[in-house]
Amino acid sequence: MARATDLDPLSANLAYLYARSLADLGETSPAIIQFCRSLALGSEDLGIEDARPRLEALVLSEQPQVPDEAIAAFRNGLTQADLENLDEATQAFGLAFQLAPIWADAVHNRGVILDRQGNVGGAVADFQQYLSLRPEGEDAIAVSQRIGQLQSSGSLPSPGATLAAGIIPGMGQFYSGRALGGFTVLALAGGVAAAGFLIEQVETKCVGTPPQGGECPTNRIISEETTKPYLTQSLIAAGVVTVIGAVEAFIKVRRGDSGADGDLIAINVGKARVVGPSVYAEGPRLNLSLFRVTF
């Protein structure tokens, strides 16, 4: 079977039969690889419906300590990846790895999706994490080669330069290749500052008492003083947004997550996760979310 798959590497049926043979021999890791190959080559289109269940069973047999929630998230990641919903797949595999930090396959799959999305830093970080969890895996050499290819394809942004650029609202995100995140920070900081300049309060000194419920007649106006009562607060708020944006960009680059747009702030409160603001692109549309709570 090994020779047959070498001679016809594009055959989904041969990859499936080879995987079955390896699984019967107890060669779990090679069998997983061949089942993945068969699925990637379109075994389900050929009517081979048990390739995916067998693959999932083998993966679970290698990870007996994985909680059910992580398994459900992993399966959701596979489904979303098949549907080309890459953002959802990334989040699902990330959740699976968060719930099961020893699950090498979860972080590897997230790295693959990030690689497809062009997120060089995130993919490199996930592949390196995968190798630390499975240094003797059969695909260790291939993963190491891919890390080298990604690192040589372009220099990664510097965390220090990203933080310095973040002094200007959104520039930290723009510098690290996250245009949508940059627009989010810029819009928030600019909107808050603009509100402080636009909101005005006019104090009019009038001779006598103006008509009840009315304004002071023009000929009785002594003076008018215009103030911006919220200017200081709005500038402080804009500064806070700028600082948060700069720190967020710095942390993402330092963790190797640059290049991925999404949630600006994410906080775990018990079993709930509060994120926002965030902006995502879906074809020609931009979706802006101020806050979102997931359980």
Image (tube, rainbow, N blue to C red):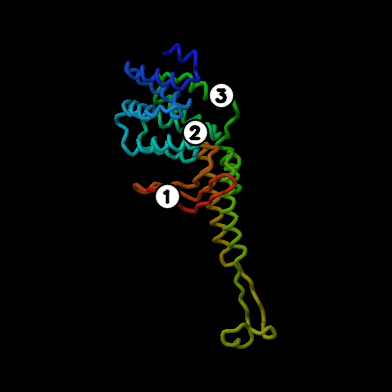
Q: Residues within 10 Å of mark 1 (few under 14, many from 20)?
A: some
Q: Is residue 257 found left or right of 169 in the rendered image? A: left
Q: Are marks 2 and 3 in contact (CB under 8 Å)?
A: no
Mark 3 or mark 1: which comes first in sequence?
3
Q: Which residue is mark 1?
A: 274
Q: Give the spatial CA distance, label 2 vs label 3.
A: 16 Å
| Residue toward you, 21 or 217 | 21
Residue 95 vertical placement versus 224 (above, below): above
To which residue does mark 2 refer? 113
Residue depicted at x 53% and y 39%: 260
Q: Are marks 1 and 2 in contact (CB under 8 Å)?
A: no
What amino acid is labelled 1 in the image?
Val
Three-letter amino acid code at disc 3? Answer: Gln
- Residue visible at 46% across and 15% down? 5
Please, what secondary structure does the residue beneath circle 1 have? strand
Q: CA distance from mark 1 to mark 2?
A: 24 Å
Which mark is drawn over residue 149? Answer: 3
Q: Earlier in the sequence, mark 1 or mark 2?
A: 2
Residue 270 locus on image (x, y percent): 34, 48
Figure check: 212 above or below 228? below
